[in-house]
Amino acid sequence: MKAGTTIAGRYVIEHELARGGMGTVYVARDEKLGTRVAVKVASLPREGSEQVRERFRREARIGSLLGQTAGFVRALDWGEVDAERLYLAMDLVEGARPLDLENGPLDERLRRVRDVARLVATAHGRGVIHRDLKPANVLQSPDGSLRLSDFGLARGDGVRELARSATLTSTGAALGTAPYMAPEQFEDSKRADARADVYALGVLLFLALAGRHPYPGTLAAILRGQKHVATGREPAPRPSAWNASVPPALDALALSALELDRSRRLATAAELASALDRFLESVPRGDATTVLEAGPADRSLEIEGFEVLERIGAGGMGAVHRARDEKTGEEVALKALRAGLPASARELFLREARAGARIHHPHAVRVLGSGSSRGRAYLVMELVRGPDLGRYLEETGRPLELAPARAIFAQILSALAHAHSKKLVHRDVKPSNVLLVAPPPEPLVKLGDFGLLRSLEESGLTGTGEGRGTPGFMAPEQREDARHAGPAADLYGLAATFFFLVTREVPDERGKPPSLRARRPEISAGLDGVIRRCLARDPRERYTSAQALEEAFRRAR
């Protein structure tokens, strides 16, 4: 819909906010009340229009019912745009973005999962089953508060007013989002009760702990993975298989929530929330990251020529240790791949080593060597003792001043320009992958973690249709298919990182590029324009190269 279009004589469209399978969401102005709202518009199919109309009515009724409680997006109004389209007006959550389970201290990520579980438990208490829980349907406000949204697939057959909703899904129909769907939901969405939402919460917990889905990949791969586990051909996925520092209690909680047989699955969302509460109460606020990521050295890790001293981090591919080079006496960072990972993971790890070794730049972490010892592939890098930018901002509790933020932007951009000249694309530029060597007011940073690095001269290393990266910092074209991520995707990630540094907000990639000046008035129109151009949804509208961005950034004051 074009800006300026009026719906129902009341809602004036401003711009598109998001697009999905159930319709398109716009930001609009309610001329009757003088407020801004979100309006979802869906087209009626030629066949089954009454079913779609009834689902819209149901979503509006459920949204109105739950919207009376904090933590839920409230439905305000619904009706016909014309004979072929329906609309649903809802609260607009200003500055919100999808639930972030990959950035920030681990205890904060666990609290977000806990808070979502509490909201789901509240909905279940009102007789509503969501059936499409995923990060995109949980809105995270700049202040950290969460609101559950999109009840388009919800069932409300436990509420008298919504009793008819149970008949809206035809027998045999599978509705939902594949990576978050329980087996019974794949077979027939009518069979999905509250325990299907518990399964989806288990996926969110797995994401927070391991940084990946328990059953990743295409629909066929997900179904195959669930079948192999259900028949005993493969063990059930554990977060600790991808992050060895996950404690047994959280490993067991994720396994219980992800039980494929729902009769053996964790029974309620409230139980999951309570279990996370108990864990978080046992860990001082802000310390969960240290508890789970840092710790004693892995004594099973023996790399010839290096003395392994302590673990300083852990991720999906492996753990990072502080080690001493026995030949030179210098301390280094030693990243070792976890044992037992598939061949594709080893190839990804070796690609990081090969590609990273080609980058020689003062603002990029140096790769010193790589190899294999006792069946464990490893990567040797320079040791950077400072925190990453994400953690630094968490510790200071405030955004950066403009001058140091500009300096950091210029340093990362210089490193990216060097990488692009080698025909390498980073594909995961974000605050947690930028290490702080010297703090503001005169910062010195190094870009690290080349685990998603892509060579423009290679192909076949990213599966068809697979989107890899970090939500909020990942360009739209990369989210759809990582193979589409070229140098312009790195410029998007850099601009999103700058936006975060000066606002402590992640830009919403679903609508028009946001304005920095609206949040920081001292930022010039020129600089605001540079950042907004980098955040354009269409990569063709961004700068043609890192060098072109460097020139524009120098001119902007």
Image (cartoon, rainbow, N blue to C red):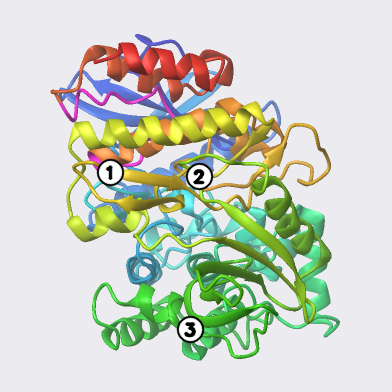
Question: Which is more N-terminal, label 1 or label 3?
Answer: 3
Estimate the x, y position of residue 191 in percent, counting from the top left: 65, 68
Q: Based on the displayed image, in which of its 4 quarters is residue 295 positioned?
A: bottom left
Q: Residues within 10 Å of mark 3 (few under 14, many from 20)?
A: some
Highlighted range, magenta: 503-520
Q: Are marks 2 and 3 in contact (CB under 8 Å)?
A: no
Q: Which residue in the protein does label 2 denote?
A: 364
Give the quadrant of residue 540. top right
In the rendered structure, the answer to whether residue 245 lies left or right of residue 168 reads left
The residue under label 1 is 443
Indicate the position of residue 102 as horizontal and vertical percent values. 46, 58
Please tell me how crowded label 2 is: few (under 14), some (14-19), or many (20+) other residues with Cα within 10 Å. Answer: many
Q: Quick check: 354 left or right of 81?
A: right
Amino acid under label 2?
Ala
Q: Looking at the picture, does residue 416 appear above or below residue 201?
A: above
Judging by the rendered image, the residue that carries numbered circle 3 is: 250
Which of the image's four quarters has the C terminus? top left
Could you tell whether 4 is left or right of 332 in the image?
A: left
Instruction: Name the amino acid type tagged 1.
Output: Pro
Residue type beneath disc 3:
Leu
Q: Residue at the location (44% across, 59% down)?
A: 101
Magenta stretch, overall SS: loop
Q: Are marks 1 and 2 in contact (CB under 8 Å)?
A: no
Q: Are marks 3 and 1 in contact (CB under 8 Å)?
A: no
Above/below status of 124 relative to 508? below
Q: Position of residue 237 (x, y in %)?
A: 68, 77
Q: Any magenta on residue 47?
A: no
Q: Which is more toward the observer, 127 or 393?
A: 393
Q: Nearer the viewer, mark 3 or mark 1?
A: 1
Secondary structure under badge 1?
loop
